[in-house]
Amino acid sequence: MNFRQSFTRSRSWMFLISLYLHLPVFSYLAATNGHSQWLAWGGSLFILSVPTALYFMGNATALLPNLLAMTIMCFSGMLIHLGNGMIEMHFHVFVALAFCLSFGMLSAILTAAATIAVHHLAFFMWLPKSVFNYEAGFGIVLLHATFVILEAIPLMLIARRYGAFISLQDTTIAQLTNISGKNFEGCTTIEDTGKKLDESAGSVSRGLENSLKMLQDLTSQVTLNTTSAKEAESLSTTSREIATDGAKHIRELIDSIKKISSSANEINNIVTVIEDIAFQTNLLALNASVEAARAGEHGRGFGVVAEAVRTLAQRCSSSAKDISALVKGNVDTIKAGEKSADLSNKSLSEILSSIERVQTLNKEIATSSVAQGQELSNVTETIHSVEALTAQNTDYANNLNETSAQLLSDAQILTELVSSMKDSAGSNKAA
């Protein structure tokens, strides 16, 4: 229901109340002037039945004001009739005509003026005593009609302006209602957006806190890795120095083994010479024994000496063989040791190469860890910046919520203002 319809129904309700307030007056006039109460009550209620029923049916069109304008003029005629044509009762016509102005409708004033004109003409012709309490001619009727017209003309001009004002107010209220609704929807949207932004900022803040914690843990781990890499580099350097010293000692051992091998070869050669000497000595001793045997008694002493020399030569030969066997065994052992030393030297060389590679890798890891630590520090600073921005966004969201709440309050005030404008025509409790 728009403002025009609400205004029409509120004025109609006032009209109905004022019309029903006429009934006790009609009853009093009927009692004092010798008229029937059936006419005062029955006739009045009959006239009121149609506009009353139309009102309670929810009608808000121009039909209801026109019927009420007709009804109030019928009540003017009833008042004049029950007053036995008293001239003062005619004043009710002018009051009622002015009362019709409250609708702000030309048709209501025209209907009222036409109704009272028909009443005066009809009752003057068929029941003149009901209209005037003196001998009045048709000219008096025309005079009354002239005054009605003179009042109706300015009333219609005022009603036209008043109706335009009501229409403008109706349009204004409709536009304000639309604006208020859109403003309320916009405020609700802003409020929801602010809440979502606040929730999103909270989620982002919590995520950033978790990420920051993880980055801090990762930074600590990278720092620890950097320290470990530096320690590993230091240990690699120490291991490289130890391996270098070990390789040096192995090379010295190999040189010593080679010298021992050379000495063993020389000993073997000397033993070979001793064996040859022992073999030749044994032959000489054997020959000396043979010659001593030939010499007989004279060569017996020489034979004993030759036998002793032969025995000594055999023992020398046997010892030389033992020494040769031992030297040969030692030479084999020395060769095996030399081979093992060569293999150890190669292994140490490979270990040294691996240590150098590990040292290089440790340096690269340490350098990379330092770079990663710097990058993580930059990322941490960035997250702190984002966290600060998130906190700022949270503040913005709170400000947005406060602004939205203020706008909602303003929208509520605007809605109440529109309601007040709608109710400015009067309260309508019966509607």
Image (spheres, helix red, strand yellow):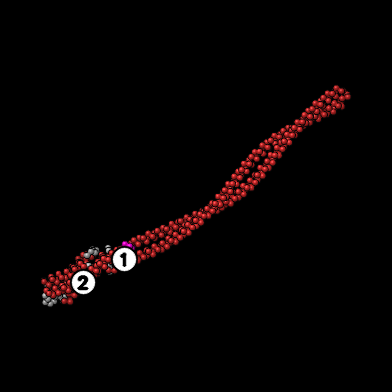
Looking at the figure, which quarter contains the C terminus?
bottom left
User: Badge 2: how crowded within 10 Å, few (<14), some, or many (20+)?
Assistant: few
Crowd tier of the residue under label 1, counting other residues whose Cα lies within 10 Å: few below 14, some 14–19, many 20 or above: many
Front residue of 7 and 20: 7
Rendered residue at 11%/71% (across/down): 125
Whether residue 128 is situated above or below residue 402 in the rendered picture: below
* Vertical side of 33 occupied by 244: above or below: above
Q: Which residue is mark 2?
A: 154
Q: CA distance from mark 1 to mark 2?
A: 31 Å
Q: Kindly indicate the quadrant of the structure image that contains residue 138.
A: bottom left
Give the structural element (helix, strand or loop) at label 2: helix
**Residue 159 horizontal/vertical position (percent):** 23, 69
The part of the image, by quadrant, that contains residue 59 is bottom left
Q: Quadrant of the N terminus?
A: bottom left
Residue at 65% from the left image edge and 40% from the top image edge: 345
Q: Position of residue 129 (x, y in %)?
A: 12, 74
Amino acid type for the residue under numbered disc 1: Val
Please give the label number shown on residue 418.
1
Report if residue 212 lies within the magenta region: no
Position in image of residue 337 (x %, y %): 68, 37
Which region is colored magenta? 176-180
Helix, strand or loop at label 1? It is: helix
Quick check: can you spot residue 221? no
Residue type for callout 2: Pro
Q: Is residue 262 left or right of residue 77?
A: right
Query: Residue at position x 66%, y 38% from top?
Result: 342
Q: Is residue 135 above or below residue 170?
A: below
